Image (cartoon, rainbow, N blue to C red):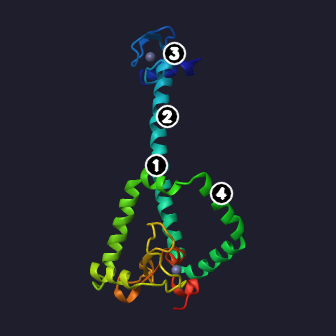
Amino acid sequence: MSAILADLTPGNLPQLKLVYKPKNEVKRCCACKRMQNVKHLNSSRRCKACAAELGRRYYLKQRDKRLKYAAARRETRRAEAREYAREYRRKNYARLVGDWKRRRDAHKEENAARARAYRKTHPDHHTQYLYAHPEKITEHNAKRAARLLANSDGTLTKQVISALYENAKHCPYCHAEFDGDATPRSPKRKSLDHILPISRGGAHSIHNVLICCRSCNTTKAAKTLEEIGIVL
Ligand SMILES: [Zn+2]
Ligand SMILES: [Zn+2]
């Protein structure tokens, strides 16, 4: 008994105030300004509903932050992965070309059948894509032009190129005769081929180009003659 009395010294009063907090005191919630019994107010004097609302808002705010962070992370990660894949392809190109060719050969018939069926059901897939994404064409052309310029030795003027086109009679790869009336997408149309592709470090130079047919150029794409098994 005497111990309790001894605790009632002025220095200990604040603690005792907490213990004997009057339960029926009414105060204003600092957020919604409604009067509330203090037992429903938390330590920052918010009522339960306002505290919950604050928590929800905080959660949403953090969620946005979290989502943004995750998206940014994904984006960087994707760019890294793309860069890694590009580097891997560059390093292992010769082997990969072999892998791709083997896979293509193994599924030649079914792939061709699928492509035929798709073309039948989507006759203007390509054209529609180009119409739908004019900016992609512009971008592609600009990139290509910049690459050509960067790799150019100045020997391929417009005149030189048109002379090359004019003098070409047969495709040096498949020996087919060029089709004089070829439509823009005809496989036997003449096209300018970079023997060592620009993307593989070839020069835009008279010493690195020839006129071949479109289908050979498409097949060759970014491969070297060695990789595609052509000997000129
Ligand atoms: Zn409130
Ligand atoms: Zn050809």
- Pick whichever of labels 2 and 4 is earlier in the sequence: 2
Mark 2 → mark 1, Cα distance in angstroms? 15 Å
Mark 1 burial class by Cα count in 10 Å: few <14, some 14-19, many 20+ = few
Q: Which residue is mark 1?
A: 69
Front-lying residue, 176 or 13: 176
Q: For the view shown, which residue lies furthest in the bottom direction?
A: 232
Mark 1 → mark 4, Cα distance in angstroms? 44 Å
Of badges 2 and 4, nearer the viewer stands 4
Q: Which residue is mark 3?
A: 40
- Pick whichever of labels 1 and 4 is earlier in the sequence: 1
Of badges 2 and 1, nearer the viewer stands 1
Quarter assignment of residue 146: bottom left
x and y percent of residue 101 in the render?
64, 76
Q: Which residue is mark 2?
A: 59
x and y percent of residue 142 in the render?
33, 65
Mark 1 → mark 3, Cα distance in angstroms? 37 Å
Mark 2 → mark 4, Cα distance in angstroms? 51 Å
Circle on res. 117: 4
Identify which residue is drawn at 51% across, 21% down: 6
- Pick whichever of labels 1 and 3 is earlier in the sequence: 3
Identify which residue is drawn at 44% across, 71% down: 181
Of badges 3 and 4, nearer the viewer stands 4
Residue 193 appears in the figure = yes
Secondary-structure class at tag 1: helix
Secondary-structure class at tag 4: helix
Residue 8 appears in the figure = no
What residue type is disc 4 on?
Answer: Ala
Q: For the view shown, which residue lies furthest in the front direction?
A: 181
Secondary-structure class at tag 2: helix
Disc 2 to disc 1: CB gap under 8 Å: no
Identify which residue is drawn at 38% across, 54% down: 134
What residue type is disc 3 on?
Answer: His
